Amino acid sequence: MDFRKIADSYGTPLYIYDFDYITRRYLELKEAFKARKSIVFYALKANSNLSVLKHLRDLGAGCDCVSIGEVKRALFVGVPKYKIIFSGVGKCDAEIKEALLNDILMINLESFEEMLRVESIAKELEKVARISVRVNPNIDAKTHPYISTGLHENKFGVDIQTAKKIYLKAKQSNFLDPVGIHFHIGSQILEIEPFKEASKIVSDLVRSLNALNIELKFFDIGGGLGIDYNGEKTIDPYAYAQAVLENLSGLDVTLACEPGRYLVGNSGYFLTKVLYEKENSHKRFVIVDGAMNDLLRPALYNTFHKVELLESKNRPDSTLLCDVVGPICESGDFFIKDIKLPKTKHDDLIVVHSAGAYGFSMSSNYNSRPRVAEVAYESGKYRLIRQRESFEDLISKEISFLNSEKSE
């Protein structure tokens, strides 16, 4: 991939996504589950660019959405409504109503109280709401505490006994149709045992529900497969599938999974240019035009992203440590600390790897910085898939109010 050509064509900072890589990852995962009826629901929260969604739609993926905005994005690019799941711990009435009116596959419930709201709104609309229940199996996924979701101390899902109460209530309701069960124990998981344990617990619950004449159609194992950021040993997709499938013996269910990071994380690159270097008596800083508002993960999670100086091959090796930092007025505005880089020059290009997931989707306009452009790379060609924001874009929602105040 010619990063310099892309940067010269579209400017920096900039995101690039390798669509050929996304295709390979999707097909690899789909192949792993070929022994069972299955649907891959892409988790939009990782990267919700419309062109990314359309590409995955064309491959056959559905969408796992955690806001009505994400549901609308999926529908906008033509994802069939029967391939859309609406998850999330706090859905407001308006979101629930719109999801029901759009007749999506199912709404994933996270509490008994949420079930009552969905039932009430469905009754008001004179519709039957297809629902699943997110079960919290109390499994430690051994990942970052901010992205661990399968323990009782986390806000997500319900315990086994509460799940049974929800299913029994839904079975008796004229406005609820229990069609699925769901668990998601966290993200960036690198060990297979938590998936195996969670599948066993939830599949046993399905069998107990079957005994109560509650027969579910979808067994949703969520997402969470980790990727290689820094030489991590990741889970083989086939082994992952087998760990789940071995617990589904005798169950006539369609298996659903919700990968996000797994599909797009290592497809993405964040390009940023060196502005200048700064040194004091204790530290060397390489200051770049990208910032934490563009790529938040290092500041938010203190996570590692490989950082590469494109011109390093033409420079003598250096043992000087530096921090690669952005221009935002926060000490947390960094991409990497204590990395050995050769002496840099103005306009040198730095590539931040593994930036396809939770990069642009978590970006903001902090410090009144316009959000960056996004580019797709596919079959050796590049194309713009999101235009860089302008200052006019930033203030467009405020101008009319300012003008009205002036006229008073």
Image (cartoon, grey):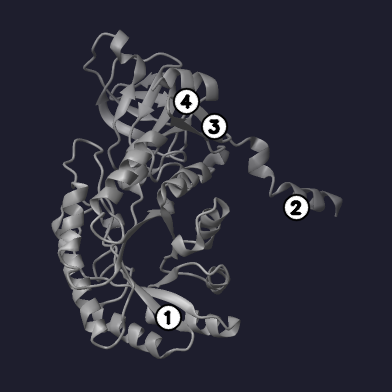
- Tag 1 near tag 4, CB within 8 Å: no
Is residue 142 shown to the viewer in this render? no
Residue that carries the numbered disc 4 in the rendered image: 381
Is residue 348 placed above or below 119 in the rendered structure?
Answer: above
Residue that carries the numbered disc 1 in the rendered image: 177
Residue that carries the numbered disc 2 in the rendered image: 401
Q: CA distance from mark 3 to mark 2?
A: 33 Å
Is residue 204 shown to the viewer in this render? yes
Of labels 2 and 4, the one closer to you: 4
- Tag 2 near tag 4, CB within 8 Å: no
Of labels 3 and 4, the one closer to you: 4
| 208 on left or right of 78 | left
Q: Position of residue 166 (x, y in %)?
A: 35, 83
| 317 on left or right of 364 | left
Residue 384's tag is 3
* Res 184 → quadrant: bottom left
The amino acid type of the residue labelled 4 equals Lys
Q: Which type of secondary structure does the marked residue at label 4 adopt?
A: strand
Q: CA distance from mark 3 to mark 1?
A: 43 Å
Image point (47%, 88%), residue name: 174
- Tag 3 near tag 1, CB within 8 Å: no
Q: CA distance from mark 2 to mark 1?
A: 46 Å
Q: Residues within 10 Å of mark 2 (few under 14, many from 20)?
A: few
Quick one: 81 or 349, which is closer to the camera?
81
